[in-house]
Amino acid sequence: MFWLYLALIAQLLNAAVILADKYLVTSKAISKPVVYAFYVGLLSGVVVLTAPFGVIFPPRLEIIGLSFLIALSYIFSILFLYKSLAASDASDVAPVSGALAAISTLVFSFVFLNHDLSRNFLTGFILLVGGTLLMSFFRFKKWSALHAVLAGVLFGLSSVFVKILFNTTSFIDGFFWSRMANVAGALMLLLWPANLRAIVQNIKSSTRGTKLLVMGNKGLAGTAFLLILLAISLGDVSIVNALAGAQFLFLLLFALIFTKKFPGYFFETVYRRHIIIQKLAGIILISAGLVFLFL
C-alpha cells in the first residue's frame, strides 16, 4: 500500500501548489496572471539537465511540431487557470478545471488516439459534473468560470499531445523537447506589448522572496508529478487517478485554516455548516466519477 501513501502525499502537495498559485496571482507579488504564466513556462528550462541522458539532436520536424502544440495548449491552460484563481476561490476553481481535464483527456484520446471510451464514461461524467456543481455552484465571478473550463479543456488536450509525443519518441527525448517548447511558448508571450511591459516591470520590482516562492512552488509541483508517476507504476492507476479528489479535500482543510489568517487571499466561505457538507459531498462524487472514468 506504499503507492497509496505516495498518491495522497502528491495530492497534498498539489493542494499546497494551488494555494500558493492563488496567493501569487492575487497578491501584489505578481502583477498579472500572464506574468506568472511566463515564469512557469520559463522555469521549464531546467530540463536542460536531462540533455546528456538520451536527447536526440537535432529533433525531427514531427517532434518539434508536437512539442509546440503541447507548449501552446499548456501555457494557455495555466494562463486561464491563473486568471480564474485571481478572481475566484481556489476550492471552486480546482474542481472545475480538474473535472474538465479528466473528461477532455478521455474525449481527446478518443479523437486523436482512437482509444475507446470506457463503458462507464457516462456514469463517471455525470458524477463528475454533479460533484463539481456541489463544489463550485454559483460561486464564480464574471468570466472566472469560463477561464476555469478553458484551463481544464486545454490541459486535457496538452496531456493527449504528450501521449502522442511519447508514442513517437523516447520518454527523455519527448520530455526534453516538450519542456523546451514551454520555454519558447513563454517567450512568445513577450510578443504582446502589454505582456512585455507587465513582465519587465514585475521582473524589476519583484523581491527575491517572490522569485524563491515561485521556484519553490514549481519544485513542489514537479515533486507531486513524480510521486504520481511512481504511484501509478507501483499500484492501481484507477485508484491513483481517483485520489485526485483528495486534493479538493486538502484544499477545503487549508481553506478552513488560512481564511481567517489571510482573508485577502483565501476568501473561502466555508464556515457555514451546510457549505462544508455540500463541499464534502462534492468531493465524494468527484472521486467516484474519476473511478468510473478510469475503470
Image: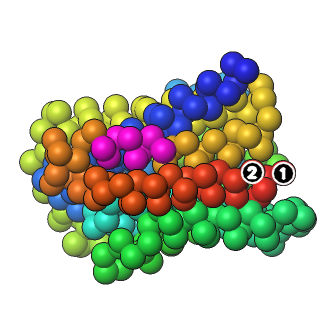
Find the magenta span and give its range. 249-256
Name which quarter of the figure residue 98 lies in. Answer: bottom right
Q: Position of residue 237 (x, y in %)?
A: 77, 40
Residue 107 in the image: state x and y as whole percent. Answer: 75, 69
The answer to whether residue 102 is above or below residue 241 is: below
What residue sits 68% from the left and 65% below the top?
127
Q: Amino acid at mark 2?
A: Val
Near-viewer residue (248 or 162): 248
> What colouring does the structure picture have?
rainbow
Residue 153 in the image, given as x and y percentages of width and height? 59, 69
Q: Badge 1: how crowded within 10 Å, few (<14), some, or many (20+)?
A: some
Residue at the spot x=21%, y=52% of the render?
A: 265
Q: In the rendered view of the protein, which quadrant contains the N terminus? A: top right
Asked if the stretch drawn in magenta spans residue 177, the answer is no
Q: List the single residue furthest toward the front.
A: 273
Residue 164 visible in this rendered orientation of the protein: no
**Amino acid type at mark 1:** Leu
Extreme residue in the bottom direction? 142
Question: Are circles 2 and 1 on residues that touch, CB within 8 Å?
Answer: yes
Most frequent secondary structure within the magenta stretch = helix
| Image: 231 above or below 107 | above
Observer-nearest of 176 and 282 = 282
Q: Secondary structure at mark 1?
A: loop
Which residue has dot 1 on it? 295
User: What residue is at 28 percent from the left and 67 percent from the top?
Assistant: 87
Q: Secondary structure at mark 2?
A: helix
Residue at screen point 53% across, 38% down: 11
Most extreme residue toward the left, as rendered?
Answer: 205
- The residue identified by callout 2 is 291
Badge 2: few (under 14), some or many (20 or more) residues near its Cα, within 10 Å? many
